[in-house]
Amino acid sequence: MSGIAVLGASEQGSGGRSRGGGGSWWVLARAWVAGVAVLAGLAIPIAVATPAAAQTGTFAYVPNFTSQNVSVIDTATNTVTTTIPVGALPLDVAISPDGTRVYVTASSGVVVIDTATNTVITTIPVGSAPVGVVVTPDGTRVYVTNSISDDVSVIDTATNTVITTIPVGDAPGGVAVTPDGSRVYVTNSLSDDVSVIDTATNTVTTTIPVGDAPREVAVTPDGSRVYVTNSLSDDVSVIDTATNTVTTTIPVGDAPNGVAVTPDGTRVYVANSGSDDVSVIDTATNTVTTTIPVGDNPTEVAIGTVTTERTPTKLTLKAKKKDKDKDHPEGGDGLTLTAKLTAEGQPLEGKDITFTNAIPLCTETTNAQGKATCKVPGKQDKDTCYTATFAGDDTYLPSTVTLCKKRDDYKPDLSSVLPGQSDVRIPVLSSGKG
């Protein structure tokens, strides 16, 4: 859950935690909007969900609190492609696993957007002052925290109706679901605890005391632990999901708010809005290994995997028969295959090249000249084809090349080039030396 807090960072200095009335909800929510989520190096206001939508490409959906709409960003061009009116005070956002629906909390309830048309298809009334929203991994349920009515609305995504309302603690805000979808964890900022909801029965099975003013919550990818930021006690509570108890409390910076776990589950990042830094927690030891200074009043953090652009490669292949000698005037039966791998005109050393001719022949590593050699024993059939393949790695794209023996010459098979490897030049080479 991104961009959610029951107390704005600007209010923490007073030490008070009253709910207030009248216009205080607007002031409270407006303070949350100062948050920034960072995904793949792009700073985006408040909250981002990126679907594999029916549109062509990948898109980010950004609720704009004051302008009462949602911006749709094409991540390929980083431009806003459309703006969707959603009503007053849009705050948090979640995307369905199949990418067809976007759910936005707003003052009117939960606004449902069809990503194929980028239009609002319905608005679902929920409790008072909806804040956080999360979709279960199977896409069948949406859980919404309502910070003033102190409950969680459960939405059936097939009918877009609230099927039950679950009482929780005081001022619920942060919400997260386990990877298996069996439990939902809700932070209650005014009662200083976390409600654990069993999604099979939609009841609170336990309430876990944590630190002062818990804000946000994140579950590790394996579902074994939950990390909760406590904004007034300046620490993070670690919950063991097997026992639903706090196993340790980790001191971090001032007024921690946003929290996110890396995809491999080895680190947790915490945005500390009061000390203007980010604490990095090692999940193996549950200690802060480093603190990173950032800008003023950081409130959110999101972790995305950035795919770097790989360099194209070029692979060529030569075939040479065994030389004639006095014992074999007609030429030898063996064959030597030599592949050369380059990138941007330079040889690539230390890369594995696999040689095949319908069956695996050998795998050899390129030398300083980018060459790898495979010796094929025995007499070769007239129509034999040989293929050399570089599988690619994190830095270089794959490439492949094939030579076919036709009437004692080795001719290229142009149809063998992999898609995207049209720049691979396959030489026509004859038997013999040179």
Image: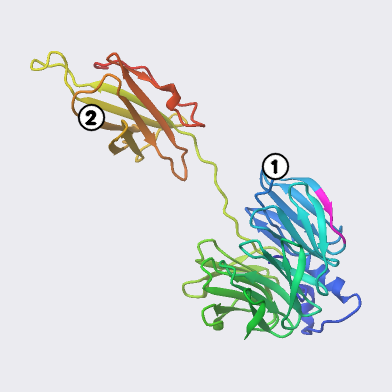
Q: Nearer the viewer, mark 2 or mark 1?
A: 2
Label 1 sits on a secondary structure element that is: loop
Whether the magenta-drawn stretch holds residue 164 is answered as no
- Whether residue 342 is situated above or below residue 190 in the rendered picture: above
Compare marks 2 and 1 and give the one earlier in the sequence: 1
Q: Main secondary structure of the magenta part?
A: strand
Spatial separation of the CA atoms under disc 2 and disc 1:
50 Å
Which percent across, then down, holds residue 24? Answer: 87, 76
Q: Name the foreground residue: 233 vs 247.
A: 247
Which image quadrant is residue 369 in?
A: top left
Which image quadrant is residue 403 in?
A: top left
User: Which residue corresponds to mark 1?
Assistant: 77
Tell me if mark 1 has few (under 14), some (14-19) or many (20+) residues whose alpha carbon lies within 10 angstroms of its own: few
Q: Are marks 2 and 1 in contact (CB under 8 Å)?
A: no
Q: Which residues are magenta?
A: 83-87
Kind of residue at badge 1: Thr
Residue 349 appearing in the image = yes
User: Which residue corresponds to mark 2?
Assistant: 376
Which percent across, then down, holds residue 277? Answer: 64, 68
- Whether residue 259 is situated above or below residue 353 in the rendered picture: below
Label drawn at residue 393: none
Kind of residue at badge 2: Val
Which percent across, then down, holds residue 295? Answer: 69, 63
The number of numbered discs placed on residues in the rendered structure image is 2
Q: Which residue occupies 32% across, 27% down?
A: 386
Label 2 sits on a secondary structure element that is: strand
